[in-house]
Amino acid sequence: MTYRIRKGVIDEAAEQAESDRILREVMLTAHRKKLVRECSGGMKRKLSLAMALIGETRTIILDEPTSGLDVESRR
């Protein structure tokens, strides 16, 4: 089965692999099963960044990218 997303077509296996990769990049793998309303403010900011990375995005413009993130993410 394939899904049509705004940036192209992706199959289920590729979708799972991409979501795993992005969650590792933003350090949210331990929280993958949480609902957004259960996340802290910093985790929500990380989730927003992860959403921006979906679909092999080439450019993301960030305003104060480290404000509100936890100390480990700032490094």
Image (cartoon, rainbow, N blue to C red):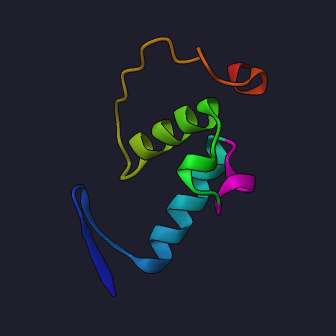
Determine whether 60 is above or below 19 in the image.
above
Q: Position of residue 33 (x, y in %)?
A: 65, 63
Total tally of numbered discs in the picture: 0
Q: Nearer the viewer, residue 43 or 28?
A: 43
**Name of the residue lying farthest toward the front:** 37
Residue 30 within the segment the image draws in magenta: yes
Residue 16 or 68: which is nearer the viewer?
A: 68
Q: Is residue 68 above or below residue 30?
A: above
Q: Nearer the viewer, residue 3 or 59?
A: 3
The location of residue 74, given as percent across then percent down, is 69, 19
The residue shown at (50%, 43%) is 50
Name the residue located 65 percent from the left edge and 23 percent from the top edge: 69
Q: Position of residue 73 (x, y in %)?
A: 70, 27
Instruction: Give the extent of the magenta segment.
Output: 27-33
Which quadrant does the C terminus fall into? top right
Rendered position, 23 above or below 27:
below
Res 63 quadrant in image: top left
Magenta region includes residue 13: no
61 relative to 47 in the view: left or right? left
